Image (cartoon, coloured by chain):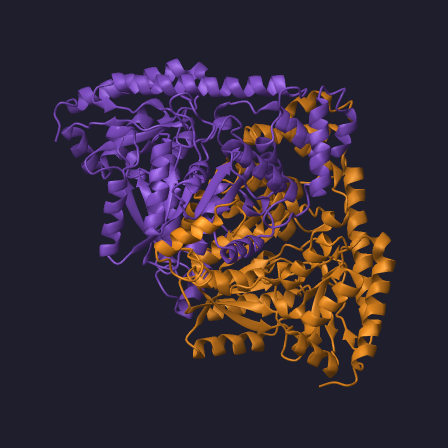
Chain colours: A purple, B orange
């Protein structure tokens, strides 16, 4: 802030000196004197690359942001039906004119229903979320899994991250509490655990086996943690995977649930990409709740499960709404009460986001006037994402020293790059990690902003980057051309992949 | 959750026993094994009274919720102009039809401007908020105070509570860090400090002096904290006051700012009620930023200031939007970077809320087509709130053993009640605090849900309750009749106010 508030600065420094302020700047709060858990937390998705991209953008150069899963920022059109409903709820006088505006009757009916349920979108709702929306969520889960869900086990939040943070806060007491998380992982988790003063315990996903989960590796990670004085009490599983694009099999899900029961570890299931499925026949999305339900009938699994979902992903892609829910299963009712109390400190999540959650969970069905357009729009987005996912992975696999697992779900590709020793040395000299160096060069030469694998975690001496599959198809030829020619030039410059360390 | 997930429960208990689960329930997470800071945090606004009100409501009985400042839940109509803009931004095809819908041209123009700025309301924005909105906030602050504000010192959040929590988290390291807060105070602060593992340090507001701040009392509180090993590093000031309805004078503001500089304490200014002003001539709202600016020219005050504002209060009353901003002043740029990083972990606040912040800060002005209606609606709400504020306090002052400071601002009255000893004894026998007992009786007999003073803090042996002034004027005669006849009956039953302890 120095110098930004006008001409006071010189005089302020004087007063600070008189007061004998701590630290050179004279501020009470300095980077050294604030909560060091905050300082230590790293969040790569908006880290060094994002800062470089912002600087580039300010300088008037083109930037293609593929660093965040933010489809509508890259031109994806919003689905019409929920926007119609939300516009009517926002400004109810429009309802009378809906017909002349071409807004179908079912949209009007849904708008009336939500308006009656929330009172006004300007009113706080119950802190765990509006009751109608929670019922729609519970009905959706029940239909999806074939096992019952209770509306009172559903909580609505301003984005899934809020729910994850809140549940982490409830469970974590200090450094001796461990949170197991995949490597690679979405860095929200490591950053949140750091801020909460817990200890992160990484388990490796198996890149050679489509980024699947290996129970022996979970045991390895658990035992290593215990040996160092940390007891894991939460395991985070991101399914479908971010950044890996993997989708776990029923067998894998059940193994993980039983492992949790054996080890007495609570399962946080990040299932926000559950409708971003590109091989539904061979790799469908299966929820942990469903796997738990199936186990309940046979192996009787007591695992405490919290599952997160959002309107930000899938074909809706309504990131800016901050609409999300989580469901708690097998969780002690007194703990649920504490979660409710914590939520109540923030009074209410945003009502537009809540309504969107309801619309996601109870979409138009065949026979509804809105169904044909809705269905066409949703399928068209998923089909397009599927084409992009497959094409991007295929392209990466044609590039020298690059290997990319097939992207069967989510919104990301996470290719591995074998970097030449000369590139690694050049990175060292420039003060960057090798994958950071590669990504900064990519940004500089092509305008494409990706996130280095080091931001997500990766096995030592391996290098990756994450890119979303979201740039519009009209740009895809161009983007692929940029990627491939940049990479070819980079490899030429630094001696190629064969010169492995 | 017990028994809610179908027929699994008996089997689950078996497995838990085999596993040798900790605690009687067999759960990994129990009230005793989770983060005890969470368990210890109390949040009275949605506490015992709210629970009783919910039970009453479920039983089909009438409840008049005056426990939360949630005007639109009590029938306050939304202001038309911002709703029109938001509907257009939500569903842009409506723009072409705006004229036929009676939506003025300036609303369309503003909608186009926001749509261009955000891309889509379904897209994440920069983590500190959309740049156009932050500029509008900075312009508003500059106009309001006559001192410059920098858009890069403004952060947008999902409600003011999120910003407060985030800044607290940044500043608080542990139990030795104190947060000074008024008694009485809005319990978000005590609860948040508890969850953050800081120490709350109460300073009393002076009820005999219109709930003003007394510098000697700040010194007393500070010194007592230091003597017990706690160093205050933040002071929270709620101005206009919640629950007190007070509005601080310029002299008081400057004294507090200078005290902060002397004591090296950071000032968190909760200024969310800044437009709820009912005596603008004698008790106008003055921001701490303005007082700081005036001091900067003379006494050169270095106080680090964070000021919070929201669309939830004022005449807008759009609680359900979760739109808010905070401005940091004199804060070290490296600390601002850390705040930005923390915000980035949640990616973006909700875009509808951001747009509402922009609309609050840049409203229609004379000459704009929307101005006459906007101005009329805004004034009508404030005038009505003013009538209700004055009337409610006046009524309380006619009641036996009740004293209420004039409500010159905010949305609350906080009357003191002298409870008869027999009532205090009856409360003890029922297992309630005396003021809780009074409020539960009020709820039971009238359906009116208020919050006991003990939820906000009060001097020992004094009792208060907080009620909002928000029930619609059409209900006011009835509500006042309920209050007065309940109170008279209560006092008769327990022997009257004269029988003081």
Q: Quadrant of residue B282?
A: bottom right
Q: Nearer the viewer, residue A327 or B133?
A: A327
- Left or right: residue B194 compared with residue A39: right
Q: Nearer the viewer, residue B21 or A487?
A: B21
| Residue B82 in view | no
Q: Position of residue A425 (x, y in %)?
A: 16, 34
| Residue B4 in view | yes
Q: Which residue is painted at 51% across and 17% down in the image?
A: A380
Q: Quadrant of residue B449?
A: bottom right
Q: Position of residue A148 (x, y in %)?
A: 54, 39
Screen quadrant of the C terminus of chain A: top left
- Left or right: residue A495 compared with residue B230: left
Q: Position of residue A438 (x, y in %)?
A: 26, 29
- Left or right: residue B45 compared with residue B302: right
Q: Give above or below for B437 relative to B347.
A: below
Q: Position of residue B227 (x, y in %)?
A: 44, 79
Q: Nearer the viewer, residue A273 or B148?
A: A273
Q: How many marks?
A: 0
């Amino acid at each position: 802030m120095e110098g930004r508030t006008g001409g006071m600065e010189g005089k302020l420094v004087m007063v600070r000196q008189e007061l004998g302020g701590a630290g050179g700047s004279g501020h009470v709060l300095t980077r050294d004197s604030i909560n060091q858990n905050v300082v230590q937390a790293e969040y790569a998705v908006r880290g060094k690359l994002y800062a470089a991209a912002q600087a580039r953008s300010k300088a008037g150069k083109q930037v293609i942001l593929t660093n965040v899963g933010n489809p509508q920022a890259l031109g994806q059109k919003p689905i019409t039906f929920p926007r119609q409903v939300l516009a009517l709820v926002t400004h109810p006088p429009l309802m009378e004119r809906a017909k002349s505006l071409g807004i179908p009757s079912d949209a009007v009916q849904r708008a009336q229903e939500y308006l009656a349920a929330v009172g006004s979108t300007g009113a706080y709702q119950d802190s765990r979320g509006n009751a109608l929306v929670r019922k729609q969520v519970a009905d959706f889960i029940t239909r999806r899994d074939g096992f019952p869900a209770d509306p009172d086990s559903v909580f609505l939040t301003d984005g899934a991250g809020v729910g994850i943070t809140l549940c982490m806060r409830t469970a974590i007491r200090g450094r001796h509490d461990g949170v197991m998380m995949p490597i690679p992982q979405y860095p929200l988790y490591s950053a949140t655990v750091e801020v909460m003063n817990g200890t992160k315990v990484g388990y490796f996903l198996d890149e050679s086996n489509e980024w699947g989960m290996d129970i022996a590796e979970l045991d390895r990670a658990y035992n290593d943690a215990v040996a160092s004085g940390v007891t894991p009490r939460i395991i985070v599983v991101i399914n479908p995977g971010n950044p890996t694009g993997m989708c776990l099999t029923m067998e894998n899900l059940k193994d993980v649930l039983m492992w949790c029961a054996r080890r007495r570890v609570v399962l946080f299931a990040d299932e926000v990409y559950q409708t971003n499925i590109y091989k539904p026949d061979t790799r469908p999305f299966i929820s942990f709740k469903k796997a738990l339900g199936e186990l309940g009938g046979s192996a009787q699994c007591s695992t405490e499960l919290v599952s997160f979902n959002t309107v930000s992903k899938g074909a809706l892609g309504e990131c800016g709404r901050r609409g999300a829910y989580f469901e708690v299963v097998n969780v002690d009712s007194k703990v649920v009460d504490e979660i409710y109390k914590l939520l109540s400190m923030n009074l209410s999540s945003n009502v537009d986001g809540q309504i969107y959650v309801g619309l996601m969970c109870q979409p138009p069905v065949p026979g509804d006037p809105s169904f044909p357009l809705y269905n066409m729009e949703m399928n068209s987005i998923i089909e397009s994402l599927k084409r992009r996912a497959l094409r991007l992975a295929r392209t990466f696999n044609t590039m020298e020293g690059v290997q990319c697992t097939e992207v069967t779900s989510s919104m990301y590709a996470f290719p591995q790059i074998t970097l030449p020793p000369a590139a690694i040395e050049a990175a060292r000299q420039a003060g960057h990690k090798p994958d950071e160096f590669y990504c900064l060069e990519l940004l500089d030469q092509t305008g494409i902003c990706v996130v280095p694998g080091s931001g997500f975690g990766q096995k030592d001496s391996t290098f990756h980057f994450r890119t979303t599959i979201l740039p519009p198809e009209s740009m895809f030829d161009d983007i692929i051309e940029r990627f491939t020619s940049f990479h070819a030039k980079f490899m030429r410059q630094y001696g190629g992949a064969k010169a492995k360390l």
